[in-house]
Image: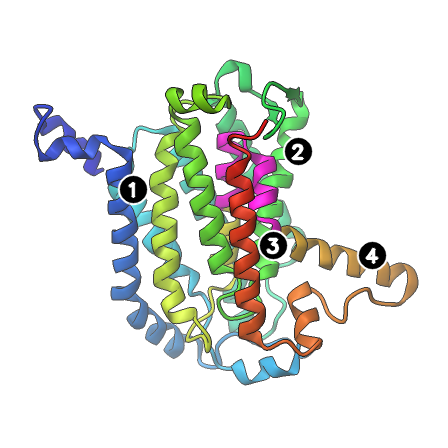
Amino acid sequence: MLYWLTALSDGGDFFNLFRYITFRAGGAFITALLFGFVFGKPLINVLRRRQGKGQPIRNDGPQSHMKKSGTPTMGGLLIVGALLSSTLLWGRLDNGFIWLVVFVTLSFGLVGYADDYKKVKRQDCKGMSSALRFGIGILIATIAGWWATQYHPETLQNQLAFPVLKDTLLNLGIFFFPFTIIVIVGSANAVNLTDGLDGLAIMPVMIAAGTLGVIAYAVGRVDFTNYLDVHYVPGTGEIFVFSAALFGAGLGFLWYNAPPAAVFMGDTGSLALGGALGAIAVATKHEIVLAIVGGVFVVEALSVIIQVIYFKRTGRRVFLMAPIHHHYEQKGWAEPQIVIRFWIVSVILALIGLATLKVR
């Protein structure tokens, strides 16, 4: 919205700053961070009054989690509120990719809110049915895939790009839409599975979003893509504003989610943030890189899949408990120890993901 102030510029004054993505990204970061600090405590107080007993704790989870009973959930409202308000304030509203990531984030956030609401109201860990949640997620991802193809250059439409084999494109044809569903729905649910310890999910999300934001900025500039020899996707640079807002919103939320958490993000936050990461990857044609920078989420999801399949076949477990962060809890690792080590792994994976911009 503030980009429109450039109409008042003569080319060399203060208003000209709003033309620059980096300047507006900085503004989006600060705005989202301040949003979190200003509205965080009042929102937590409202959630605590409205929810009473807070988020129900699973009886089949680690027994140490029972002490978290009474902690309010739906803290994702703070993240999504800060993220969307900052993006709409600082982003270019004539950019199709901005509206794409906003659509996916808000849609998955609403699905997560409905799921959280049912859990809190019934005081039952079972919220929305899995079939309904996945069905809506598939619809959202399908729309997002179609949306992305409308803004991709013709040479990149329905194509899968490879991060190291930069001259190689795989034409997925009609299978691009099922692939998009796997990326976006898979990302949303992987982040949801990771959100099991205080601060565990939000920092890897911020790291992945920051990395994808840099990639979006790079592939949206023809001079950068010529130098790096990556595919040029005009318009994606504006996603950097969204990513910066997400980083600021995440920091503002982490202030209250740091152990011991005063609020949980709930499905409202985890589904929205995971969906956002998937949408950015699809928009920038860096779906494979998302699997690298979001490797923590991939491993968390795979641990659940492996555990379920192996248990059904053999009646035995591969992990002491799934997702894998619970496995380490059962092995005696302290919660902060698990969280910080997962953060470290996320930073390493992010650096590897960024390195793919140059490696060929």
Q: In which quarter of the image is the N terminus?
A: top left
Q: In which quarter of the image is residue 257?
A: bottom left
Nearer the N terminus, badge 2 or badge 4? 2
Task: Label 4: state its secondary structure.
Answer: helix
Residue 178 numbered mark, or none = 2
- Amino acid at the residue labelled 3: Val
Magenta segment includes 347: no
Q: How is the image coloured?
A: rainbow
Q: How far apart are marks 2 and 4 (CA)?
A: 23 Å
Nearer the N terminus, badge 4 or badge 1? 1
Residue 309 numbered mark, or none = 4
The answer to whether residue 81 is above or below residue 122 is above
Q: Residue furthest right?
A: 314
Q: Dot 1 surroundings within 10 Å: few (below 14), some, or many (20 or more)? A: many
Say whether marks 2 and 3 touch (CB < 8 Å).
Answer: no
Range of magenta residues: 276-296
Residue 296 numbered mark, or none = 3
Q: Quadrant of the C terminus?
A: top right
